[in-house]
Image (spheres, rainbow, N blue to C red):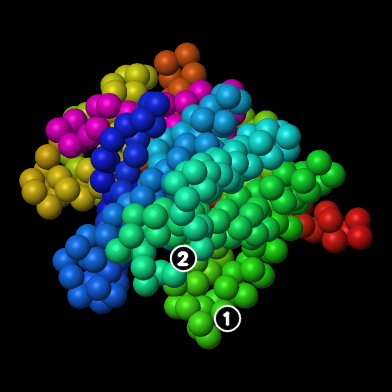
Amino acid sequence: MKWSWKVGRIAGIDLRIHATFLLILAWAAMAGYSASRTGSGALGGVLFILALFLSVVLHEFGHALTARRFGVSTRDITLLPIGGIAHLAEMPRKPSQELRVALAGPAVTLAIIIVLYLGLYLAGRSPFVSTQRLLTNPGDFFSQLMWANITVFVFNLLPAFPMDGGRVLRAVLAFRLDYGRATAVAARIGQAFALVFAIFGLLFNPFLVLIALFVWLAAAAEAAEAQQHTSLEGVPVERVMIRDVQTLTPHDPLRVALHYAISGFQHDFPVLDGDRVVGVLTRAKLIEALANRGEDVSVGEAMDTTFVTTTPGEPVERALARLQECHCRTLPVISDQRLDGLLTLENVTDYVLIETALHSRAIRRAA
């Protein structure tokens, strides 16, 4: 995620903080100072938010470590003002596994609530406290932290996909529906909740509007990803790749690549030395070289010599994951050390759109 910083690594998972997280720390400091008119009040507000987000981190590790049991890795956990996001490589496709992953986070939050309650009970502190006393009494601090976790627990279990409750709903639906259909239904319910959040936010709490926007966009993105999985499942690269490819040699001047780029559809060009692919001239590299050195520079001086490839028989989903990991837009498709074609993000997108349209038409005709 852009504008985020790595602050540590726990159990092999990077912990990151998004730049916008600093906004909620600033808000907590101002709220604490406003309530007490002291610097210690501002510090108490910041410490409370940090304690709450420590609970959020533990919640997200509940998801990540449970997913790891099913062979699903977690790229990182990122803290945002609205909470934490565990970036799983993918969600388990078996409904029973997704159900356990989705419930693991709330289970950790519930455990935190129980520990805080027992601690308050053994210390003779009341679990009921006003927020005004939060910054002046350690017992009140932990009472409020318990109630904040209760709020997180209840809110996360609302069936608003893609929050935890929405993922539980998707998993339950997937026991009876195919994965794509279950996701579509859960996403529509999630977006309905987003509208409710937005209305309540406009009337009572603007923060709910931000949550509504996140839920709406995330639900739509998850639905699109599920549709992509349905369209690409079991499809080999050779069915999607571009076969009519313009190639370059290391000795060609950049003006040749410029001509191909302007007159055709290609953005990235494989560079061949004989039959062997020795590099890829990307659009970014082409523009950079043209700006700095002109169109007479050779392709070999501007091309990328470190590049990722795929094969005709590899599943598109696996190749697409590698395409996204390398932050590139094109993979040369190589068989027996010879170039067979190109796999591009644009071509994969076009294929998914066409398959979705054909699937929708088939459903309408069947109905």
Three-letter amino acid code of the residue under disc 1: Ile
Three-letter amino acid code of the residue under disc 2: Val
Q: Residue at x 69, y 40 (%)?
A: 99
Q: Which label number is shown at residue 308?
A: none
Residue 335 seen in this snapshot: yes
In the displayed structure, does residue 136 sit left or right of residue 217?
left
Categorize mark 1 by other alpha carbons within 10 Å: few (<14), some (14-19), many (20+): some
| Secondary structure category for the residue under label 2 | loop
**Nearest the camera: 113 or 346?**
113
* 221 w.r.t. 282: above or below: below
User: Outermost residue, left direction?
Assistant: 293
Which residue is denoted by mark 2 in the rendering?
129
* Residue 308 spot, x, y in % from top left: 37, 28
**Nearest the camera: 125 or 244?**
125
* Residue 44 spot, x, y in % from top left: 27, 60
For the C terminus, the image quarter is bottom right
Q: Residue at x 49, y 19 (%)?
A: 335
| Secondary structure category for the residue under label 1 | helix
Which residue is denoted by mark 1 in the rendering?
199
Magenta range is 299-322
In the displayed structure, does residue 122 sit left or right of residue 175?
left
